[in-house]
Image (tube, rainbow, N blue to C red):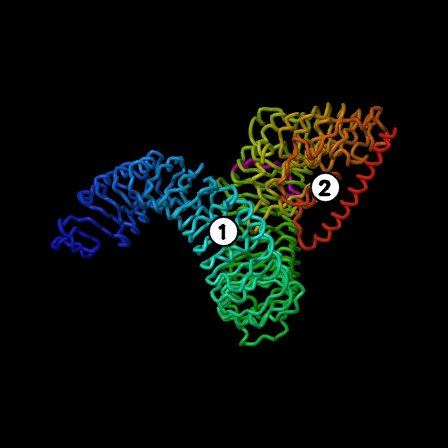
Amino acid sequence: MMSWKEDKDCCLWDGVTCDSLTGHVIDIDLSCARLHGSFPSNTSLFLLNHLQRLNLAYNDFNLSHISLDFHRLSSLTHLNLSCSNFFGQIPSEITHLSKLIVLDVSQNYEFSIETNTLKGLVQNLTKLAVLHLDYVNMSTVVPSCLMNLSFSLCFLSLSSCELQGNFPNSIFHLPSLKTLNLAYNYNLTSVLPMFNWSSPLEFLDVSSTAFSGELPSSLGNLKYLTHFDASDCDLYGVLPVSLGNLSNLNHLSLSSNNFGGQVPNMILNMSHLFDLDFSLNQLTGPIPSHVNTFGTLVYISLYSNSFNGSLPSWLFTLPSLQFVDLSFNELTGTINEFHSKSLESLYLDGNRLHGSVPSSMFELINLTTLVLSLDNSSAIDLHLFSKLKKLRELDFSRVNLSLSTSFKGNFSFLQLTTLRLSACNLREFPDILRKLDQLRWLDLSENRIHGRIPKWMWNIGKESLHWLNLSYNFLTTLDHIPWKNLQYLDLRSNSIQAPFPIAPPYLKFLSLSNNNLTGEIPQLCNMSILQVVDLSNNNLNGTIPECMVNSSSLHVLDVQKNRLHGDIPRAFATGNNLKTLNFNGNGLEGPIPQSLVNCSRLEVLDLGNNNINDSFPYWLGDLPKLQVLVLRFNNFYGSDWGSSKFNSGFSVLRILDLSHNNFNGYLSVRFFENLKAMMNLDEEKKKLNYMGDSYYQDSLEMVVKGFGIHLEKILTTFTTIDFSNNCFHGEIPSSIGKLHSLRLLNLSQNSLTGHIPSSLGDLIALEALDLSSNKLVGVIPRELVSLTFLAKLNLSKNQLVGPIPQANQFNTFENDSYIGNPGLCGFMLSKKCNIDEATQPQSSIFHGEKLKISGWCEWKFVMMGYGCGLPLGLFIGYQVLTTGKLQWLLRMINKGTKRCERTRRRNKKTKQKLVSS
């Protein structure tokens, strides 16, 4: 605005345009003018009655409100206030600008609009062609108020507006609409038009919304479409063949949905395609391949599907291709010779490729990222890849590497910032590291490196290294940690002994679990940003330092399975960020400190296997996010379960283990009614997620089917109650039957009396039920037959009488489920019933109303166990199947199958005998 001087005609000022006949100011464009300061509400700008265009975009008006006087500019046709740091609500006076053709108030971040104001825009601005409201908060807006938008509208962008509810389907049919952007409105629902969808749309983005349903074949009618993004939605079904009609498309992204089946070959008709993303779906079959297709393709991502067959031919020939991610599929065969040198990023890991690396790969001079895994390959000489001078990221995890070439000065990776050589059978730190001055990420985990870290390693990325993973090796000593900017250090599962050196000041993650550390907990109290400390499975002794629970940054403190003693620290700071406290398997004593109520973000509290002496900490129910509470094998006591202390609380608790303590009294009806998270986990919408974050995931010791197991990860849909080995008495509350998402229920080894509640038949997700060693009487409720996922049943050592129900899973349980109940009879016992069991009504897993597909673990073979008690569902679903467990899994499947066959033959023979008799 240096040219804005009073002695000059304002029509000559920069950014000002006047009408050549009248001299009136009709256009002011001050976009990107670096204006800074408050926008005055009484500015003389509003005196320009003839102003038609006003552009103030990309300035900084210091959180000023939009003036109510904008309505005085009644001749405005174009108004652009985007990216100018305005604040507050969009005033309703804007709706009086009835001549507006373009309105852009996007990307002010603190903007909001009310439903009535938006309704006014829709009703009054009948000439509107462009409406740009990105990042305007519309969380209170009802989407239906957009239904009557002007037929002249050709551009509508509402991304990141927090819109929720159902988006009007009629907007897809607006006759002039060319751009529609609804991205990042996570709770916005709708379905794409299934029929008669003919539109001039060129740009359509509904990514990161809750759009659902199938991709309609009518999409193929949008012949002008150049950009279509429906990633991260709830779409499913097969890809329609009509996609091939979109011959003008240059951007297509359908990632992170539930599409299955094969990709239609018609997609090869998209000759103008620039980037294609089908990643994170369930697509199968071969990847479409033709030498003359995809002539303009630059970016393609197909990772995490089930594609099979060989690598597509265009991978090796396309002259434009720069980014390719085919990782984590089922591709087989070898890597062919590359005929083009355009590739910059190549991801081929997580497949079943084999053979050698083609020599042409060393000629990919533009390559910056290479991620590769090969099965049963001959040894690959890592030094050869130093020819790729632009290489920044190299990941050869699970590749047979050769480091036989002695290190020479001309073999160097000058640009390398990321190196991952996990599970490459390395026995020493490779010499290739010696000149990596810019290294930021280094992963040498799961190798066979012994001894101590050599001193020459201390100079590797001394200023730059911030991520180091040396886990699952045989390291014994760590003398020094020289990397001053290190943030992530993973040394789990080695043989490291104390003393542990002083950790760098900016460390966020530290894992030393499964080592031979002795002495006291290392000095970590001065580390102001430390978030995760995992010292589990060592031989540490002493006490837990008070300062560690005073940290405002710490999220996880895991010291399970050490030799710690003394009291639990008492001074948990107000406002702390702790999410996980795992003190299991130590010798801690005393009561639970009530300062734990300050841990408002706590999700996991595991105090099992200690010597804690206290009554039940009912006040932990005030923690709003507590999902896991384990107090097993301690000296807890108390009988006031029915008191007013349990009127509320524990509403999100999913795992509760109070076993092996001294609790007594009656089981509280009110307590079980509070466990809302066990009543409905809405599992249809749940995916295979685990508790924890990307680096640390919570684990748990528990008893399943009578065996103690270690859950390396905890599924977010896993629910269990274990009150076994206490002194509870009285009847089992029928309110337990409301916990419809409960997987395991163990009330054994108590003094419970009365009948088994028939409401337990409502626990439709139950997979293990143990009521053994109590004083229960009466018959086994017929309603339990409806528990079609029940894999383990133990009713032994009670006083039950009458016939054992015969149907579904009850046909598979053997004698040990019922021993110690002299009054029981049934075909699986030596004591047969007097009634004809064959005449009992049979319920069917295929016709039972309570049948529900279990989505909690997403293992496709869970249902294989029906007819033999689902013997594998529990174990397989909860375990993390590492490579070492695969053979175990196969043996278990074989064993389970044989048991099924034996059970079926036995049942058939028994029924034949009953019929003949």
Q: For marks 2 and 1, give the one nearer the viewer.
A: 1
- Indicate the quadrant where residue 614 lies: top right
Mark sitting on residue 865: 2
Residue at figure coordinates x 21%, y 40% from the top left = 72
Q: In the image shown, does 183 or 558 lie closer to the viewer?
A: 183
User: Secondary structure beneath disc 2?
Assistant: helix
Q: In the image shown, does 487 or 318 lie closer to the viewer?
A: 318
Which class describes the residues within 10 Å of circle 1: few (<14), some (14-19), or many (20+)?
many
**What is the x, y in percent for residue 395?**
57, 63
> Could you tell whether 452 is left or right of 36 in the image?
right
Amino acid carrying label 2: it is Gly
User: Secondary structure beneath disc 1?
Assistant: helix
Rendered position, 59 above or below 590:
below
**What is the x, y in percent for residue 748?**
73, 32
Where does label 1 land, which residue? 243
- Indicate the quadrant where residue 647 lies: top right
Q: Quadrant of the N terminus?
A: bottom left
Tell me which numbered mark, 2 or 1, is placed earlier along the sequence. Answer: 1
**What is the x, y in percent for residue 62?**
30, 47
Q: Which residues are magenta?
A: 584-598
Rendered position, 763 above or below 570:
above
**What is the x, y in percent for residue 92?**
29, 36
Q: In the image shown, does 786 or 30 lie closer to the viewer?
A: 786
Q: Are marks 2 and 1 in contact (CB under 8 Å)?
A: no
Farthest-out residue, right: 917
Q: Residue 372, can we see it?
A: yes
Q: Within the magenta stretch, is there residue 325?
A: no
